[in-house]
Image: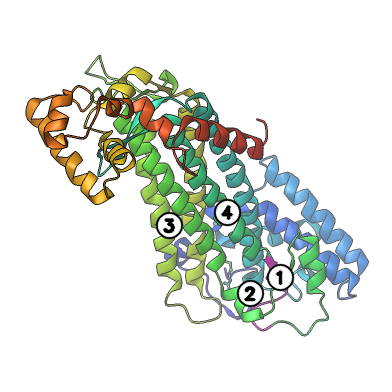
Amino acid sequence: MSNKMWGGRFSAGPDAALEAINASIDFDRRFYAQDIRGSQAHVAMLARQGIVTDEDAAAISQGLTEILAEIEDGTFTFQRALEDIHLNIESRLADKIGAPAGRLHTARSRNDQVATDFRLWTRDTVDEIDAALLGLQQALAEKALAHAGTVMPGFTHLQSAQPVTFGHHMLAYVEMVGRDRGRFADARARLNESPLGAAALAGTGFPIDRHMTAGALGFTRPMANSLDAVSSRDFALEVLSAAAIAATHLSRLAEEIVLWTTAQFTFVRLSDRFTTGSSIMPQKKNPDAAELVRGKTGRVIGALVGLLTVIKGLPLAYSKDMQEDKEGTFDALDTLGLCLTAMTGMIADLEPDAAAMKRAAGSGYSTATDLADWLVRELRLPFREAHHVTGRIVARAVETGTSLEELPLADLQAVEPRITAAVFDVLSVEKSIASRTSFGGTAPANVEREARAWLDRLGAK
Ligand code: ARG
């Protein structure tokens, strides 16, 4: 049997393989609410423009409302033979109201229809992601406030560098997530134009009002070029880029959590809610959730690269390749949402081990820069020379197996005779962090102020 929606020129039905490769209903049914919303706006416009009668429009609208209820209560039967969500709904409408159903698709094509649905869905999902990103920022900023003065080692090259505070480290991620939200917001603003009414590719001869449908669907305006409207998927690419970058940020934080929870680091403890045991090693408490956040980032990046690859060779306007835009996008945004939920829970529950971090913060000659800065301030040495003097002092400490703080004054003076006992004042980790009062620096007073400002801006939980 040929297809009842478009089979006029066909005498034979599709091969089973065609049906299998062609059908998108298994995944695009996710659009059902957006598809019905778009059709409601379209038919209201057709009636107002006198393109369909008010009576037909009322029957169509009523039928669509019933179909929405059928889908939501699980009584709707989706059919693969009807390819996609658009034809499944239209076919059901025909079963319900008969001939007037056939008027819904006047001055419209599945090409502008699917572009509209996908933009509406993406817009809704971006709003959900933004709320989840906000939740993560709040959890991070609360940890930051609670640990504004908790010392931890700061690293470069993953080697001890200079002491920082745990709160400062948390706030670094608050900033990163803030930019992630900015990227989603930018993408949302650009995607929020309506393709509806572009029809197949060239527009239509019917006197439609695209401004009316755009307004009804919450778009800021109709897209200006009908070819662009049905051909472009850069809105999805932008959202996937924002998702890939956000997931990459989560992955870095996840990697740090994995590292910090090792017996070698012991910087933080994860709650039982976010760790798992081993089936053989009774002592284990594994950071699986963090590992999976790190691992799942691969899928999100993969979705971006996948869609770029699908689109890169496509001539204008619509090609069926574009049906491949959905699964990766759905998966990427679902995955990001899940990772955000898991990360927010991990951060909220996580407990820093202040003693272990302080011990680690003092190791590795982490206050050597403070010593060099003291030489610049007190002895007026040029920084480059102070750096050299300090390097020799560090070498001396390495040789004798002591920390900088414990090095006898005589050893310091052997390198630079003008050094006095006052230098020991700047060599503790507390003194080091307290001194970093420059804008954006790690001094606890800065961190506390920044954490409060963020929590204020983010709104109470
Ligand atoms: N299921 C299709 C998609 O997702 C809808 C558009 C089909 N358009 C067409 N000309 N066959 O892309």
Q: Secondary structure at mark 2?
A: helix
Range covered by the magenta-colored residues: 193-202
Q: Which residue is mark 1?
A: 196
Vertical comparison of 86 with 132: above or below? below
Give the Cα distance between marks 3 and 4.
Answer: 21 Å
**Place of residue 56 in the rendered image (x, y in percent of width and height, measured from the top left):** 87, 65
Q: Are marks 1 and 3 in contact (CB under 8 Å)?
A: no
What's the amino acid at mark 2?
Ala
* Viewer-side label of 1, 4: 4
Q: Is residue 102 left or right of residue 365?
A: right
Check if residue 226 falls in the magenta segment: no
Q: Which residue is mark 4?
A: 182
Q: Are marks 3 and 2 in contact (CB under 8 Å)?
A: no
- Name the quarter where the N terminus is drawn: bottom right
Q: Is residue 354 visible?
A: yes
Q: Which residue is mark 2?
A: 229
Q: Quick one: label 4, few (<14), some, or many (20+) residues within 10 Å? A: some
* Viewer-side label of 1, 3: 3
**Place of residue 432 in the rendered image (x, y in percent of width and height, measured from the top left):** 36, 31
Say which label, 3 or 2, has the lower sequence index.
2
Q: Quadrant of residue 454?
A: top right
Say which label, 1 or 4, has the lower sequence index.
4
